[in-house]
Amino acid sequence: MAILLTGELENEINELIIAHRKLDIPPPMVAKWNLQIDNKDPIRLLSQSWVRNAYNYCTRFWGQFDSVGDDYGPGTTDLRSTTGNRADINSPLYVKSDAMGGGFGNGYMGATGDASRGIVVGTGIGAESFESYSLGSLITHGVGSGQVSYSDTDIPVLSWDGINDKFVCTYTRRFLNNSGDTITINEIGLISHLGNNPYLFARDVLSPAIDLLDTQQLTVDYTLEFPYP
């Protein structure tokens, strides 16, 4: 579950990174959400819910080995798409997102109206699970009942923090409610498009949930921080 990112929590994360560096162990990647409705004060959250797809992708990419096992679960490295299809590609997975050039279709770059990749929102209230491969109940694109309008994903902002020795990459997407009624957003997720299929990499349940009133717009930033030793 995403938890409120306080100054105290930021300090704990920094201390953990320092401890890893002292032991010459690769520091952990940190993922953060920033949620803002119109011009109201933003809500900063720590994402804690990478799912098996994300770990299997990183394991296979770094290890450069073929698929292990024939299922989606413990002891396997296959991925499962948001439609439930299992990926047993017999070569190391890779993705070319074209993100910095504003290309849409791969990676986290969802275009206007595309709720199948990138940052997505939902109404599902089910508990988080490491085995998740889709949102509990994805909110679809549109202006009908229960729908929101998905914007383009902004070209990600990538920077090098030389003081803290880390790369910082932020993806941003907006969701406009023109449905005529309030929509309660209970979950947020991140979907990567690899090859011909979309794969959920993260799902965070929001507590409390966000009530997006009619005509309001929710801006969601997803920031990935990659500290170096």
Image (cartoon, rainbow, N blue to C red):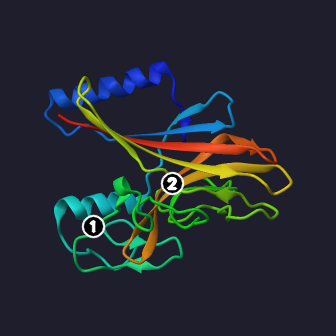
Rendered residue at 50%/65% (across/down): 133
Q: Amino acid at mark 1?
A: Tyr
Which image quadrant is residue 83 in? bottom right
Whether 81 is drawn above or below 145: the answer is below
Q: CA distance from mark 1 to mark 2?
A: 21 Å
Rendered residue at 47%/79% (across/down): 85
> Does label 1 or label 2 sit earlier along the sequence?
1
Quick one: label 1, few (<14), some, or many (20+) residues within 10 Å? Answer: some
Return the mark for residue 94.
1
Determine if residue 25 is in view. Answer: yes
Q: Is residue 64 toward the left or the right of residue 80 in the image?
A: left
Q: Is residue 228 toward the left or the right of residue 225 in the image?
A: left
**Image position, residue 34 (x, y; %):** 54, 37
Rendered residue at 66%/39% (across/down): 207
Which image quadrant is residue 146 in? bottom right
Determine if residue 128 is in view. Answer: no
Q: Amino acid at mark 2?
A: Thr
Q: Which residue is label 2 attached to? A: 153
Rendered residue at 41%/57% (across/down): 102
- Nearer-the-camera pick, 150 or 188: 150
Q: Is residue 168 toward the left or the right of residue 208 in the image?
A: left
- Image quadrant containing the N terminus: top right
- Nearer-the-camera pick, 212 or 113: 113
